[in-house]
Amino acid sequence: MQPNLILEDTIYTLEQLQEIDVPQIALAGRSNVGKSSLINALAGRKNLARTSSTPGKTQSINFYRVDPWKYYLVDLPGYGYAKVSKTERQKWAELINQYLISTPGLKALAVLIDSRVPPQQIDIELTSYAREIDLPLIPILTKGDKCKQRERDAKQNEWTKILGGIRPIISSASSGLGLDRIWHAFSEHALDPEEFARIDAEVKKAKAEKKVLRAARAEKREGAKNKPKSQKAAPSKKKKKKK
């Protein structure tokens, strides 16, 4: 079951922050961590969130409604990009901090971390701050397809220690690695237990049905492949009637 993401609101200033009485999962990460690509992959669309080869393009807080599950994914501005002015970085930091501490519907903070690089101080500081204000964390290691399995495992173990036992989800926007687990974590935090159990059952049922359908199609293709070709019957020789 693929949820639908709809960009519903975009804000740029503290004055535009409004209290929205809807569960929210915030997404934060360094400017080149691949946040927009992951949002597009989660949505199953290519151009929902703007991607760019130039880090620091997302300068707003973007609210994506998750249908039909009735909560929001909130894309926070990327942080830590050195070429942005100090004043601009400070403005983004204030906007992010104000959102984190003043949003009653915020259920968890998904922190995106590049799986290819050593732990960065700015990521450690953000995760520590979230724990200080008792905000649940969903750590996600991005670009997992660009690392070998042992490298991913080592990075996952390293961050698990840093986060006091919280194990990151390894993901890849291009290969789809970890996307189901991410949706599962988002919904588990955003929804009440009864609603989550219902949705989780629906998702598992849809997956099982797809698996059966794929198996049936594969069996049909294999059967067609192994079926002996029928020989064409020789044309019958009809006797011509004598006039």
Image (spheres, rainbow, N blue to C red):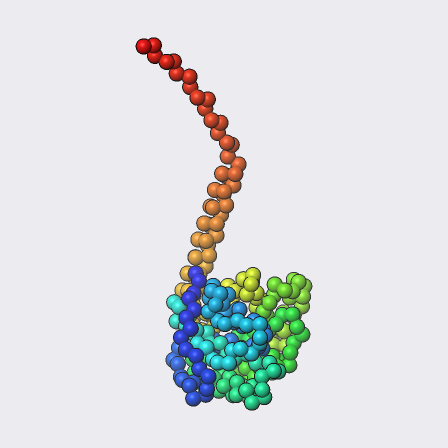
Q: Who is closer to the viewer here, 79 or 70? A: 79
Q: Residue furthest top?
A: 242
Q: Position of residue 196 (x, y in %)?
A: 43, 68
Q: Position of residue 163 (x, y in %)?
A: 60, 76
Which residue is rendered at x = 48% and y = 80% of the image? 60
Q: Quadrant of the N terminus?
A: bottom left
Q: Quadrant of residue 112?
A: bottom right
Q: Is residue 148 above or below residue 57?
A: above
Q: Who is closer to the viewer here, 170 or 201? A: 170
Q: Is residue 122 visible?
A: yes
Q: Is residue 132 above or below residue 143?
A: below
Q: Position of residue 106 (x, y in %)?
A: 46, 79
Q: Quadrant of the C terminus?
A: top left
Q: Who is closer to the viewer here, 61 or 240? A: 240
What count of labels does the image hold? Answer: 0
Q: Is residue 111 above or below residue 153?
A: below
Q: Residue furthest front?
A: 243
Q: Quadrant of residue 68?
A: bottom left
Which residue is rendered at x = 66% and y = 62% of the image? 148
Which residue is rendered at x = 52% and y = 38% of the image? 225
Q: Is residue 137 visible?
A: no
Q: Who is closer to the viewer here, 22 or 223? A: 223
